[in-house]
Structures are given as structure tokens and as C-alpha cells.
Amino acid sequence: MRKFTLLHLSDLHIDNADDPNFAIAREYLKNDLIKIIKEKRKQIDAVVISGDIINKGKLQSYDLAKNMIREIIDIAELSADKVLIVPGNHDIARDNMVKVLYENLSEEDLNDINFINDKWQYFKLRFKPYLQFVNEVLNREFIQEDNPFEIRDIKLNDVKVRFILLNTSWLSFGSDDFGKLLIGRWQLENLTEKIRKLDKSDFCIAVTHHPLEWLTPDQKELVDNYLRDEMKLGVNAILHGHIHNGKIKMESNPNGTLVSLVSGIGYPEKDGRESGQPKLSKCRYSLYTFDLDNNKVDCCCRISNKDGRFMPDNDLYFSEAEDGNYTLLFNNKLGNTNKEMLKDNDSFNEFELDTVPVTAGWTGREVELDKLSNNRCSVAIISGVGGQGKSALAARYLREFARGQNKKYKFGIWVDCRELPETIHLKLVQLLEVISDGEETAIKYKDEKIEDTIKRFYNHLKANNILVVFDNIDAYVDIKNQEIVGDLSKVFNKSLDNEHDSFIIMTCRIPISDNRANYLPINLNGLLEDDGIKFFKSRDIRITSDEDIYYCKKIIRKTKGHPWWLGLIAGQIKVGKTSLKKCADEFSEYLIGENPKVNGYFNGIWEGMNSKVDQICKEMVRCLVEAPRPLDENDIILTISDKINFKDIKKSLDRLKSLGLLEYHEDANSDNMFYQVHPLVREFIHQKYTVSDQRPFVYKLLCLFLNAKVVNVLFNNFESFENENVEIKYSKGLLDSLETCLNSRNYVEALGLICNSYHLLVNGGFHVEFVSIGCRILKEIDWEKEEVTTNFRRATFLSNLLDVLSVIGNKNELNIFLQRYKNLAKSSTIPYSLYLSTSMFIYWRLENYDEAIHYMNEYDELSESYSGLWTFNDLSCTKGLILRDSGKYEEALEIFNTLKKDSSNCGNIGRCYQRKNEYDEALKYFNESLKLLYKEENLNSLTNRGYALFWIAEIMFENGKYIESYLLLYKSKQIWRKYAPALLSKLDDLDEKLLQYRNLEKVDEKSEQFLKSLLRE
């Protein structure tokens, strides 16, 4: 059996001026270890200590700590080399000079991989006592080159375990570290480079002091990528410290799976205890047994009682035996997870796109739930006015029948479509990446047309019995005709017109008319009186007397049983702002006739929120209104003013929950809870406050996703942002920032941001994202006022968007944008030249060569009158492509022969000769292109290898070399299937002609050998 057991300690906070109670507690820890080893027959194979060994950087405490660790080593019967330690923020002395040095470094300095060679030495100085301590514990010699981060490969029971010891504390300066720390690309690259020189390990564990949430958002994303990527650090599990509450979880995304063990080990700091109180309870430590044969980790979690004595920790998760033992599976595919382990977690599932709303206090809707569960339809649409509970019903159904005990689908997935009039293509691409378990990546299908994406989606519906919920599709509904429009209508029709065993649910406000037999419409009305009473009771509202029931029914009648309105009322009663009787009586005064308006009621609540905590609540709501997605508590805390203390922020968050002003969302792959406001709250805030009123909250929100310096220039010095190359790096935060600007109606800022960063999206292969966001911006702004066609930077963005749109977008939309471009770019002007060169390229791509030649001639005429014309792409190359594909091969060759003989140009020349049937000359250039392409490693070159092999295969076929043709066609297929599946249809004709060779033996080996022979020629 390939097993090993780790003892995980952290946050010991050993102090030479120690409280005697803590010395006693450490004795209890040692005694408990002896007991566990004996009773459970545990063999500890290594000890991991994840930082904060001493307290407040008191270096004289290291001697006491050294003795403590050696005693634990003796108890575990280990040698010193089986101890793994990382530094915590308390293990180093605070140094104001280091802080000043940091504040004078740019973001570019901190991200420079050469940081370790020139600047790290100044930060490393304060780790010298820590490094000396570690080397003494490990019985190894201290050398100046040692770093407080390293790779250690250790053999544990014949399992080669790699420990990646990361330093999260080098930029820790005090209590205000949350969301501000860095590990640094330089540290990650240094460790990655060392791993490349090592043999492969059986299992890899990263150890950090701080949880990753303490890093900056961009850094967290970067570190997560390095940890999961097998070509980089390739981590299977991560152990943390620093926080004193328990958490054991598994997180999966298409890049990989991480077992995260943050079991809250350690002792509360003195500052965290009330004066005179030892507070020895809730000190934790854990033992983890990793079983590689069965892909599981058994966790034995221990917690101290108020006397400091240790006992099983049953607070974390459900354990039937209540012995503090839990099991977590890792590296498993869908359907092989240990769902029973998590307390109240019947929703564990590896596949998650958007977080699912939590249906707290669910009451009523049994009839509608039965309709959904007993149907034999392909598509259902739940409709009803805002706040009627459409999303709650869909979420309830998904949890019960796709993730719960009554499971009838292989899996269920939630797609949030609110505020997305242009992005259903993007949502589908993201959805397919998730449900294919990362096989069908968005970048791989970057140039796929929506029709082909929908075909892929249908193939998954047909191959799997799955449930997909498209929530809040109102942006795609034609209210007048009561029908779904746009690209979502294609999904709707494809799902109804073709057979499959899956089920699609959509939610919107307007009922959708459709007569097809496998369509199920469900229109929601208000709750009935009995259900309304149950609703109030589920919100902990006391209803005990007949009088209570009378007032309750009166409220239900006046609100027409509107669930969200009832939730607001319940929230007011719960926090003591009103009572059932008072609320029912006030309704009579409040009503205008018999038509109460929920917005008016909410306005009354809003205006009555005047306390200190209420003001913080309002600030939170105004931030969340503009958020592009649900945020977790950490994100919310980061958006609130620095002047507000943590305690008041937590109190305000609890108040919002009680008031019913937050929607809860749950991520199936973690135990995190996420929050967002109801669409009706968003509508209210946008009616009440202007764009300018909301800017301070948008600013804070953007600082979650972008560097604060970038946000500052974007909002406070926009002209400078427009005219200078403000450094922006691609990350998910960039997309979130663009979404935030759009959601908050800051359309000009969205335009400025995308003009400064679109190249990151285009060059990175994020074409669907670029089209989705770019089109939304163009539809919101005034083109003429914002000089979209006459400002070079903005016009260049427009040209690039039209180019990508011509590949994957809606042709009608493309034509509308082109026509608007033409109308605003005045003829016979320099800006008009960019319109002409863009049109040349786009019409060539669309194979409308007459139009392309027309614009080419017009451009040439303009060039006779003006110099310094604007151009899109390489103008000479574009002209050559137009001439080549319109049959003017000699003219095309004249142009191509003047250009640099790179891989692309050699391919273009070869294509000219191929079209002229001069195959020997064509093969010469194709072979040259192929050799150059195999020396390049970018995505474009990988795609072009497929083209070169395909064109050579065509010539081989024409020359009667059918086996050779098939071998190259096979190789081209392999490449495009991996890097550009959207191009595979181009191979269909030749594939059909070579049908008889599909059963060729050893085709992989033969095709590889033939390719190598071509590259040697």
C-alpha cells in the first residue's frame, strides 16, 4: 500500500515570555500525540509546520521552539530530515526599512523573474535568524545561499513525496495584510526551474503559511495556475496555517484538482484573548494519511477544550462516529466522490460554471416542482414577475434531482445569463469547457462559429443525461412576441427539435409561447396563504396566535404573495424594525388604491437604514450591485472602506443576511458561500443613484480585479490612460473589470480599458470573450461623440473586433458595424484609410474578392493623395492574399517575393504555385514553411502546421501518392483536433476521397516517420 501520514502543526506562537497556560497546553498536545499514536496505531512519517512558530518576531523564542519541535520529533520517532517548515509572519522581525524598499518598487520589479538575483537579497536579510533556526532543527549546516523557500523530495514508505515550501510572508508588514501579499513570479519560476531538473515524484504537496486568499487577486490567480499546472509545480495538495478556524476541502477546475487542508491548527495569539483569560479552547492540530492507491486522504482532527485538553474535532464536517475522522477523495472523476462526508453538503460536484443560488427556507411550489420532476420534455421555461422565485425553483430542482439523494441526471450545471445580451456564445464555450472536464478549452475553440458551438453543446446533451439551467435569460426575450431571440433561440430550437435525454430549464419574466409537445411552460404566481405562513415561519418569524395568523394573511393578500416582498417584510420583523401587526396596519396607509409597489416598500426600508451598521450595509449593497459575479466574504471585505473595522464589516454582513437583501450562492467545488443582490435591488439602486453617485463604489470594486494604480489612472486621469500605454496584464480580473464597467454604466471607461488591453485578449486566444465584451461596448456608446472611427487607438480596436467578428460572429452584426464605420469615417481622410484596409482584409476572409479588390483599389487611390495612412495588418500581405485567391497568381507572387521568407510567407507562395498546378515548386515552399513552423511554438504556428500538412497532402493526392496523402491528412487532423478543432471541417473533402485508407495499420507510427522525413529534406 502506498500510504504516508503527516502531522500538521501551525501557529504555535511560542514566546519566551510565555503564559504558563500555553506551556501546559503544549504538554497536553504532546500527551495527546502519544495517545493517538498508540490507540490508533498511527505511524507518523513526517511533520509539517506551516509557520508562526514563534510570537511577534521575538528571536530569543527560537530556542524554546527548537526544544518543543525536537520533543515532537522524538514522540513521532522520526529523524530530523523528516521535518518540513515554512516561515510565518511572526517568525521574522518587522522592519520598516524593508517596507520602504517595497513601497519604492514597481509592479514590474515585483513580477520580474530576475528579482531573485538583484533585489531579493535585501528582503532575505530578515530571514537569517529563521534560516539558522530551521537548519539547527534539521541538523544541517547553514549557508548564505539558503532561501526561506525550497523543494524537498522525501521518501515516505516507498512513496516519493515532493514538498514545495513556499514563502508567503516576505511582504508581510502587519495586521493589514489580507488581500495584499505576494509570493512572486520570481519565486514560482525559481522553484519550477528546480523541479525540471528533478525526477518525477509520486505525490506533490505545497506548504504555505497564509491561505491563498491573503494574496492579491492577480497573485492568487497566478499562484493557482502554477500549483495546478503539471508542467509547472503540479501540486496535488496544499497545507496552510495562519487562520484559526477549520477548513478541509477539495477544489477542482479544468486546470486540475487541489486538496486544501487548512484545519485551523494552532493556538490563539495573546492579542486575540480577553484580558486575564487563558482561552485554551479550540486549539487544533491534525494528522493526514494520504492513500495513493485509493485516491483518498484520511483526516484525524483534534481540538482542545476550555482546559486545553485535546478531543476529537467534530465541528468541521459530519462524522457518523463523531470521532473527528474524515475522508476526502482526490483526483477522482464525476460520480466517484465521497459526498456523505460533508455536513449538509448534498451538492458536491466537480462541474461548476456559475455558483448556484441557495434556496434557504424553501416553502410552497410543490405543484410546479412536481411538473418539472414528472415531465418528459426537453425544455422548460419558468416565468413570472421579478422576485417571484423563478431562480429559487430552478435551483431547488437542480439540487434535488442533479445533486441530491433523488438524483436522476448525471450532473447539473448552472448558467447565469443576467445582463448578458451579447454573451451567450461565451457562456456556451465556457460551459463546454467545464462539462468536457477541460478537454474542450475556450482557447482551442477560439475561432469557432456559434452554430458549431451549439452543435457541440447538443452532442453533450445527446451523449449524457444532464440538466442545464440558463437563469435570467430576459436579455434574449422579445417581449412583444413572447419569444426567445438571438443566439439563444438557436440553442432553444436545437434542444427542442432533436432527440436527447437531457433537460434544459430557462428562467425569465415574460411567458414564452411555443406549441411543440416537448416544451413545458411554468408561470409562477404569488404564494398561497398557507405557503406564505410557512414562508414567514421558515424565516424564524413567530406565528403562534390567531391574531398573528390574521395579520400574516393580510400581508400576504396585500403583497399578492410576492416571495421577495415577503422576504423584505420578514427581514424587517427579524431585526426589530416592525411587527406583523404594525406592518399589516401600515400597509393600509401605504397603499395607493389596491396596487402596492415593491419598489416603494423597498425605498422605505432603504431610507430607514441610518445607523452606523446600516450605513456600512448600504455601502456593501451599492458595491455588490455593480459586481460582475457573486462575491465571497473576502472580496466584500476588500471593497469596503479601510476606515471601517473588521468587526463592523462582519456585523453589517450579518445584518444584510437578516434583512434578506443578499442572495446566497454556493460553489459545489468548495465550501465557500458567495453573495449578490437580487435584480430588483439592482434596478432600485440604478434608479435612485446616478452613474456619478456610484463611481466611488465601482472604483473599489475594480481594485479587486485590477492593479489600483491602473484603476486610479482610468478613473482620475482618463486622458493619460487613453494616450499612454498603461501596463495591463491579462487575467480573469481584466474580464471582470470590463464587465464591471459595463454593469455600472461606465461605458466610456469600458471603451478606454478595452482599447488599452484588447491585444491581450486577441493574442491570448480569448476571441469569444473579446467579441462578447467588445460588441456590448459598441452598442452602448455614441460612436461619433467618442471618436471611435477617428481616434487611432479606438479605430484600431474597432478594426480588430470586426476582424474577429468576421470569423466567429453574427454576419448581420458585422455588416451593421461595417456600415456604421463607413458612414462615420469620412472618405478621403487618413482615418478612412483604416476603414479601407480593414474592409480589404475582412472581405478577403469572407471570400468576397470583388469587394476586397474594390477597397484595395480605393486604398491605392487614397495613398496617392496622402502619406502616413493608417493600415490594418500587413497591407502588402493582405493585397497578396486577395490577388492569390482571386486567381491573379503572378501578381500575388510579385508581392510575396518582396516580403520576408518566414513560415507564413513561404506557405502563401507555395499556395500560389499549388493553385497554378506547379506542384514541385509548391512542395519546395511548403516544406520550407513546415520546417520553420516546427521551430516555432506559438498557437498561430501550431495551427499553421495543420495547414501546411493539409496542403502537402492535397498535392500528394493529386500526384497519386494516396498513402502519403492520408498520413499527412491524419497528422493535420491530430494537430487541429488539439489546437484548432473549428478548422477540422476543411479536411472533410480530402478525408472522404481517402476513405479506404482509414484502417491503415500503425498509422500513428507511420505518419510520424513520414513527417520526420519531410522535415529532414
Image: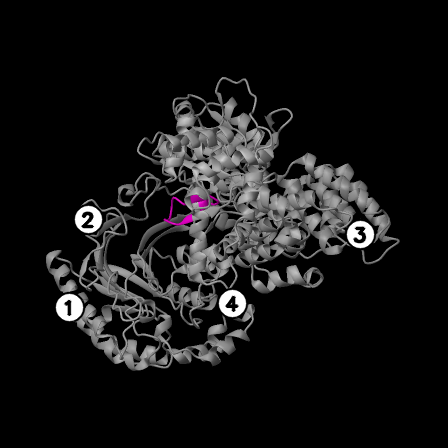
**Side (left or right) of 343 relative to 749:** left
Q: CA distance from mark 3 to mark 1?
A: 78 Å
Q: CA distance from mark 4 to mark 1?
A: 43 Å
Which residue: 81% across, 58% down? 868
Considering depth in this image, is 964 or 817 the residue closer to the camera?
Answer: 817
Q: Residue furthest left?
A: 38
- Mark 3: amino acid: Pro
- Mark 4: amino acid: Asn
Label 1: state its secondary structure: helix
Considering depth in this image, is 358 or 348 the residue closer to the camera?
Answer: 358
**Side (left or right) of 393 relative to 959:** left
Query: Looking at the picture, does residue 130 appear above or below residue 860?
Result: below
Label 3: state its secondary structure: helix
Provide residue 146's location: percent of width, then percent of height: 36, 77
Which circle's residue, 3 or 1, is located before the other in the chain? Answer: 1
Q: CA distance from mark 4 to mark 2?
A: 47 Å
- Mark 2: amino acid: Glu
| Residue bearing mark 2 | 322
**In front of the other: label 3 or label 2?**
2
Label 2: state its secondary structure: loop
Query: Looking at the picture, does residue 614 appear above or below residue 354?
Result: below
Any magenta on residue 651?
no
